[in-house]
Amino acid sequence: MPYERARQIEIRFHDAVRQIKKEPLNARELAAILVVSTSTVQRIIAELRRRGYSIRSVREASGWRYELLDHHSPQIEEVSS
């Protein structure tokens, strides 16, 4: 079932973009939403950046947060649930 695993990963990428687009989130918050580890969130962010998304890490009083800079970033294929 390699297709199913790849589909789940793409859905996770799509969900990560959607969440960061709504509001800047730190790795722990995004991990809780996506139900993954913070290490996985870091890998997701790295892959999204590699795909052309402008995501920056912003230092705030409460810590670091991910922020989507360009709302016209590359499209992730829509994957139906």
Image (cartoon, grey):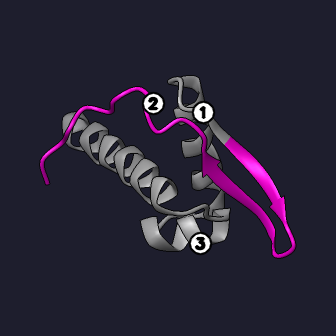
Binning the other alpha carbons within 10 Å of mark 2 as few (below 14), some (14 to 19) or many (20 upward) gives some
| Amino acid at the residue labelled 1 | Ser
User: How far apart in space, not on screen, are marks 1 and 2 (Cα)?
Assistant: 7 Å
Indicate which disc residue 73 carries.
Answer: 2
Indicate which disc residue 29 carries.
Answer: 3
Mark 1 in CB contact with mark 2 (< 8 angstroms): yes
Residue 67 magenta-highlighted: yes
Q: Residue at x 50, y 24 (%)?
A: 51
Q: Considering only vertical position in the picture, is 76 above or below 40?
A: above
Binning the other alpha carbons within 10 Å of mark 3 as few (below 14), some (14 to 19) or many (20 upward) gives some
Is residue 27 shown left or right of residue 11?
right
- Numbered disc 3: secondary structure: helix
| Amino acid at the residue labelled 2 | Ser
Binning the other alpha carbons within 10 Å of mark 1 as few (below 14), some (14 to 19) or many (20 upward) gives some
- Numbered disc 1: secondary structure: loop
Q: Quadrant of the N terminus?
A: top left
| Image coordinates for residue 69, horizontal then vertical, percent | 60, 40
Q: Considering only vertical position in the picture, is 49 above or below 23?
A: above
| Amino acid at the residue labelled 3 | Glu
User: How far apart in space, not on screen, are marks 3 and 1 (Cα)?
Assistant: 19 Å
Q: Residue at label 1?
A: 54
User: How far apart in space, not on screen, are marks 3 and 2 (Cα)?
Assistant: 22 Å
Is residue 40 shown left or right of residue 34?
right
Q: Considering only vertical position in the picture, is 39 above or below 4?
A: below
Is residue 29 shown left or right of residue 15?
right
| Image coordinates for residue 45, horizontal then vertical, percent | 59, 43
Q: Which mark is first along the chain, 2 or 1?
A: 1
Q: Which mark is first along the chain, 2 or 3?
A: 3
Q: Considering only vertical position in the picture, is 25 above or below 74?
A: below
Q: Residue at x 75, y 49 (%)?
A: 57
Q: Quadrant of the C terminus?
A: bottom left
Magenta-drawn segment: 56-81
